[in-house]
């Protein structure tokens, strides 16, 4: 079982950073929605608050790692311009997608939207993490702040979902390939 | 925070939260505006190409992040101990966020550019 270095790094970008960021946002959204209907605010031990803060920090780090690795490592491979007269576009995903009207939409809508909307998620969740940390026990006294946090967290979830969906579909139709081959397990050729 | 009593936490001014919420809206909106401008104008796209392999996306996102962080810093300093009209701040932030989402949506951006 083998994969190329570029495919491996793309998998880390999408399946490690991106997917776990999406799951972490989901956890925050569920907790925020639960807290709206709670009779009493949850009162954690000092260690509980530390763990909660660690969760929020890890979530924010995952979000920024996802967009930065996407924009500065994977995206340059995706948008590389093929040399003139090249026979196969297999190593040039953007050019490959745009070469056919049946796949051009994955770039024109998918990548064009994903490359920008994805950044909304870490911006929004950095704000959410800051507010939740600073106002965690005072949130019931500030219902409008909680409303804003819920709205931004939901938008971040949607933005990360759009980015994840199109990322997956783009990689399905025109996978990022190239670089050294990494041998994962089994017999190597 | 752990050493603060619940009563004292309940009287926290809402200024710092308002600064964080409004600046997040500003950052998202600026990102949308810059994305449309870079798509519409080759000179803007060239100006925003801060890292050639990534193209204009590097400048669009980096400039938006800088503006987001700068606005957060300035607003947080201004509202550090103040209680502000958070309802209006929320409404403005939601409007900016919605505008940002709309501007990053390619069919809407194309419509604006008459494509």
Image (cartoon, grey):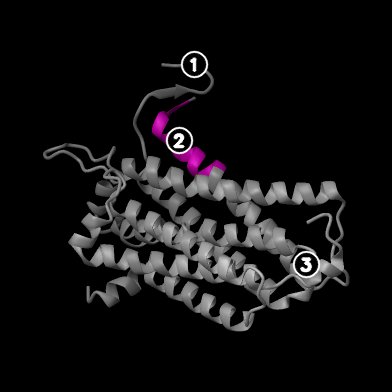
Q: Earlier in the sequence, mark 3 or mark 1?
A: 3
Select label 3 or label 1 by which is in front: 3
| Region rendered in magenta | A2-16
Give the chain letter at badge 1: A
**Residue B104 in picture, x, y percent from top left:** 38, 67
Residue at the image point whose x is 25% and y is 53% from the top = A98
When the figure is inspected, residue B18 is found, relative to residue A10, above or below; the finding is below
Q: Residues within 10 Å of mark 1 (few under 14, many from 20)?
A: few
Residue at the image point whose x is 18% and y is 61% from the top = B43
When the figure is inspected, residue B6 is found, relative to residue A72, above or below; the finding is below
Cβ atoms under marks 2 and 1 closer than 8 Å: no
Cβ atoms under marks 3 and 2 closer than 8 Å: no
**Residue A140 in picture, x, y percent from top left:** 79, 73
Work out whether residue A93 or residue B68 is closer to the camera in this orientation and state it: B68
Residue A156 is left or right of residue B57, and the answer is: right
**Residue A139 in picture, x, y percent from top left:** 75, 69
Cβ atoms under marks 3 and 1 closer than 8 Å: no
* Badge 3 and badge 1 in a common chain: yes
Is residue A10 in the magenta section? yes
- Identify the mark at residue A187; answer none if there is no mark: 1
Give the chain letter at badge 2: A
Tell me how far mark 3 sits from mark 1, CA to CA: 50 Å
* Badge 3 and badge 2 in a common chain: yes
Residue under label 3, please give it: A34
The answer to which image quadrant residue B60 occupies is bottom left
Work out whether residue B40 or residue A165 is closer to the camera in this orientation and state it: B40
Residue at the image point whose x is 51% and y is 65% from the top = B74
**Residue B42 in picture, x, y percent from top left:** 18, 61
Residue under label 2, please give it: A9
């Amino acid at each position: 079982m083998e994969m190329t270095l570029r495919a491996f790094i793309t998998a880390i970008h999408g399946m490690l950073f991106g997917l776990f960021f999406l799951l972490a946002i989901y956890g925050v959204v569920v907790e925020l929605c639960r807290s709206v209907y709670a009779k009493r605010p949850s009162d954690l031990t000092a260690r509980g608050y530390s763990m909660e803060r660690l969760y929020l920090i890890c979530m924010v780090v995952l979000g920024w790692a996802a967009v930065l690795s996407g924009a500065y490592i994977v995206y340059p491979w995706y948008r590389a311009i093929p040399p003139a007269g090249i026979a196969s576009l297999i190593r040039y995903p953007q050019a490959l997608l745009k070469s056919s009207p049946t796949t051009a939409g994955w770039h024109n809508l998918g990548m064009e939207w994903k490359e920008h909307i994805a950044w909304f998620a870490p911006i929004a969740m950095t704000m959410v993490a800051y507010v939740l940390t600073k106002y965690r026990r005072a949130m019931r006294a500030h219902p409008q702040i909680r409303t804003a946090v819920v709205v931004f967290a939901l938008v971040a979830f949607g933005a990360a979902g759009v980015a994840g969906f199109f990322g997956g579909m783009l990689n399905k139709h025109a996978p990022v390939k190239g670089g050294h081959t990494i041998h994962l397990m089994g017999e190597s050729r | 925070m752990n050493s603060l009593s619940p009563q004292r936490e309940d009287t926290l001014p809402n200024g710092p939260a308002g600064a964080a919420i409004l600046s997040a809206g500003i950052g998202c909106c600026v990102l949308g505006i810059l994305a449309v401008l870079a798509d519409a104008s080759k000179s803007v796209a060239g100006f925003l190409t801060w890292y050639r392999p990534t193209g204009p996306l590097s400048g669009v996102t980096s400039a938006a992040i800088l503006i987001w962080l700068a606005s957060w810093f300035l607003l947080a300093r201004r509202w550090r101990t103040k209680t502000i009209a958070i309802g209006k701040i929320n409404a403005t932030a939601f409007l900016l966020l919605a505008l940002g989402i709309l501007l990053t949506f390619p069919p809407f951006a194309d419509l604006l550019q008459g494509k």
